[in-house]
Image: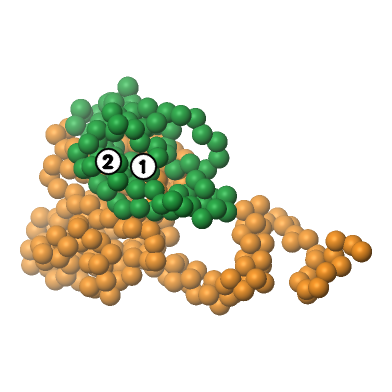
Chain colours: A green, B orange
């Protein structure tokens, strides 16, 4: 596990082709690790017949909605939580 | 020698797709191959489909009602939904993980899968059509309060809206807030108030009949 609960992380904004479980709207955004779900086979390689190994740690990362959507209309306290695999996360 | 001159006995007619959606034809072709190779049996496929589509929100509602009447159980449910569900004889499925989150006076959770339609089917049954629709999947993350308002939920600005995007190996179940005036109800009566939509987080539970009478 490279990241710990409460740690700030940034989602990589590198481009990708093919199957990917990191939604585009959080790419390049900075959030905070609020859950560590455990490790799972990598769906990006599994989707093409590989074994998905090595397993990737999966984190629940919480973002302030106003950081994600510059035009977010709701209060500053609103949040979105996205599950992101470790190989998409960088130290913020 | 032709490409078909080999030593096994499957049919070589192309798998037709007369009016069949391409994804369905692909799934059917895949099933044919897996059965032929002995990876699975038709009976196993049938049993699995039967189990999945026979699930209903009643299972999730049992969990929520039990959590409402038993704070210790609620604590266990929020910590480890799979183990807590097993206490009630409920199976959250072979995978993936299921995480339960609690709505309170301060926080309102709602669940979406922006990438496809991930959903806690083992506890809620098949997802509603709107959950899989592009408008819900895009708007639930970018303007959740507007979506909630369309479902009839108007939240105070002081309540934090927390959207859970189940993009990966985790499915989320919302434990809605127990309605006022339900102190005298049995666990079964409470479970009848817990709707599918309230466990997705786009609605509150039903109000008890006595409160609206």
| Residue found farthest to the bottom | B43
Where in the figure is residue A23, as x and y percent of width and height? Answer: 42, 37
Q: Position of residue A86 (x, y in %)?
A: 36, 42
Q: Residues within 10 Å of mark 1 (few under 14, many from 20)?
A: some
Q: From the viewer's perspective, is B33 left or right of B170?
A: right
The chain that hosts pointer 2 is A
Near-viewer residue (B174 or A1): A1
First of labels 1, 2 by sequence position: 2
Q: Is residue B97 left or right of residue B106?
A: right
Residue B3 locus on image (x, y percent): 85, 61
The reply to whether residue A32 is visible in this rendering is yes
Left or right, A16 with reference to B113: right
- Indicate the quadrant where residue B188 lies: bottom left
Spatial CA distance of label 1 from label 2 is 8 Å
- Circle 2 sits on which residue? A3
SS for callout 1: helix
Q: Which mark is residue B31?
A: none
* Secondary element at image label 2: loop
Residue B157, percent from left and from top? 17, 32
Say which quarter of the image contains residue B4: bottom right
Pointers 1 and 2 in contact (CB under 8 A)? yes
Residue, disc 1 = A86
Q: Nearer the viewer, residue A22 or B142?
A: A22
User: Split into 4 quadrants, where in the image is the C terminus of chain A?
Assistant: top left
Query: Which chain letter matches label 1?
Result: A
Callout 2 crowding tier (Cα within 10 Å): few <14, some 14–19, many ≥20:
some
The one of B66 and A79 positioned closer to us in this rendering: A79
Vertical placement of residue B99 versus B111, above or below: below
The residue that appears at 25% across and 46% down in the rendered structure is: A35
**B134 is higher (above) or lower (below) than B1:** above
Q: In percent of the image, x 40 and y 40: which residue is there?
A: A87
Identified at 15% across, 65% down, the residue is B73
């Amino acid at each position: 596990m490279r990241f710990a609960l409460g740690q700030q992380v940034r989602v990589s904004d590198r481009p990708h082709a093919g199957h990917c479980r990191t939604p585009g709207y959080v790419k390049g955004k900075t959030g905070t690790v609020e859950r560590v779900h455990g490790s799972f086979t990598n769906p990006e390689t599994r989707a093409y017949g590989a074994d998905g190994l090595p397993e990737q740690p999966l984190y629940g990362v919480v973002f302030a909605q106003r950081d994600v959507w510059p035009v977010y209309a709701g209060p500053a306290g609103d949040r979105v939580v996205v599950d992101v695999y470790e190989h998409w996360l960088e130290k913020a | 020698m032709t490409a078909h001159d080999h030593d096994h006995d499957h049919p070589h007619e192309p798998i037709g797709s007369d009016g069949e959606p391409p994804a369905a034809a692909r799934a059917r072709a895949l099933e044919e191959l897996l059965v032929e190779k002995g990876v699975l049996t038709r009976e196993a496929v049938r049993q699995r489909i039967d189990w999945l589509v026979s699930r209903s929100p009643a299972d999730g509602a049992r969990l929520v009602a039990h959590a409402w009447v038993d704070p210790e159980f609620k604590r266990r449910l929020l910590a480890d939904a799979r183990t807590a569900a097993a206490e009630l004889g409920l199976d959250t499925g072979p995978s993936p993980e299921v995480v339960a989150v609690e709505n309170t006076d301060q926080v309102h959770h709602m669940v979406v899968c922006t990438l496809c339609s991930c959903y806690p089917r083992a506890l809620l049954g098949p997802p509603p059509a709107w959950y899989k629709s592009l408008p819900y999947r895009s708007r639930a993350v970018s303007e959740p309060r507007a979506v909630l308002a369309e479902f009839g939920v108007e939240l105070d600005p002081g309540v934090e809206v927390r959207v859970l995007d189940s993009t990966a190996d985790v499915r989320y179940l919302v434990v809605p807030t127990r309605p006022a005036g339900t102190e005298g109800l049995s666990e079964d009566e409470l479970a009848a108030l817990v709707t599918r939509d309230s466990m997705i987080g786009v609605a509150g539970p039903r109000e008890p009949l006595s409160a609206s009478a």
